[in-house]
Image (cartoon, rainbow, N blue to C red):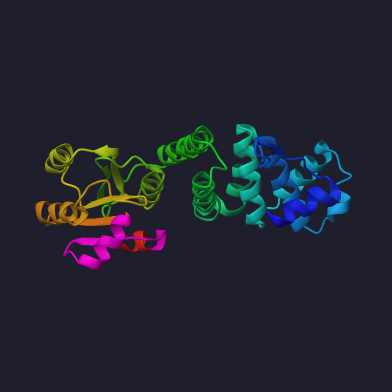
Amino acid sequence: AGTIRIWERRYRIIKPHRTDTNRRWYDDDDLVRIINISILYRHGFKISKIATMTGVEIASQVAMLSADTGDTGTQLDSLVVAMTSLNEKAITEILMRSIISIGFEGTFERVVFPFLKRVGVMWQTGSVDVGAEHFMSNIFRKRLIVATDSLQPAGHSNSKRVLLFLPEGEWHELGLLFYAFIVRKAGHEILYLGQSTPYNALADVIERWHPHLLITGSLTRLPFERPESYLSRLSNAFSKTKILVSGAMAEMAAKKKFANIFPVTTVHELKEHL
């Protein structure tokens, strides 16, 4: 914030809005401009030079820099700009360049999920609205579903039946969708129940489908009052089935040491259980 104020005073590079009590605030266009300026500055452009550039010139330079798929920081900044502008075309271009360079799996691990973590911080500080966050999440959701559907169903003798679900009250499914992609890519059969799955519905599907492995989790909090009771219930009811849990559930599972429940915090750990 201090650096931005210096830029404001010395170069008039941005003009903040003012409240009735004279407190400065920035709108979405200001945020985009600040991010673009910071990208150029990080790549060696002098602020005095940036101050003479038009908005079109700045955007053009940033677009060229964002084409460097080895520069994750610039890719993340460019995604923030595209999200703020609700520019799906720009988002798609950034994702496609990354996928070509480091693959679909690498793009989600090294670009998408770090970006979502940054958006979470921005949301907490009021720097991004819920609509923009949902806009981005649904773009990523569509990409994951299409990529998973494009993979050939399991056909080898060692393939397992893997059931993926989120507990009732949990709605953040991008991580689970990504795990579904990893499981299908490894050649296993998946049954995806998705968000907020009631326990009785889960039990019914397990009884009918007989999965070898269950995968579940929660993002940052457990959507029930006594999470250890939920994990105990899963462990006891499906004692012959291996259960993998991620997110906040993984922390609980690591503490309680259930016989058939294993915490998973990375893709590598997931693959070791497949």
Say which of 209 and 136 sits in front: 136
Say which of 128 and 271 sits in front: 128
The residue shown at (40%, 48%) is 175
The residue shown at (89%, 45%) is 52
| Quarter containing the C terminus | bottom left
* Residue 92 in view in this figure: no
In the image: residue 248, left or right of residue 210? right
The residue shown at (63%, 55%) is 72
* Residue 49 in view in this figure: yes
Q: How many marks?
A: 0
Residue 258 x/y as whole percent: 18, 64
| Residue 72 painted magenta | no
Say which of 7 and 246 sits in front: 7
Say which of 132 and 194 sits in front: 132
Residue 153 x/y as whole percent: 34, 42
Check the image and report above or below for 32 versus 252: above
Query: In which quarter of the view is residue 240 placed?
Result: bottom left
In the image: residue 230, left or right of residue 123? left
In the image: residue 47, left or right of residue 213? right
Query: In which quarter of the view is residue 145 placed?
Result: top left
Query: In which quarter of the view is residue 12 placed?
Result: top right
Check the image and report above or below for 104 versus 193: below
Q: Name the residue furthest front.
A: 21
Residue 221 x/y as whole percent: 32, 51
Residue 194 x/y as whole percent: 31, 39
Question: In the image, which residues are magenta?
Answer: 247-268
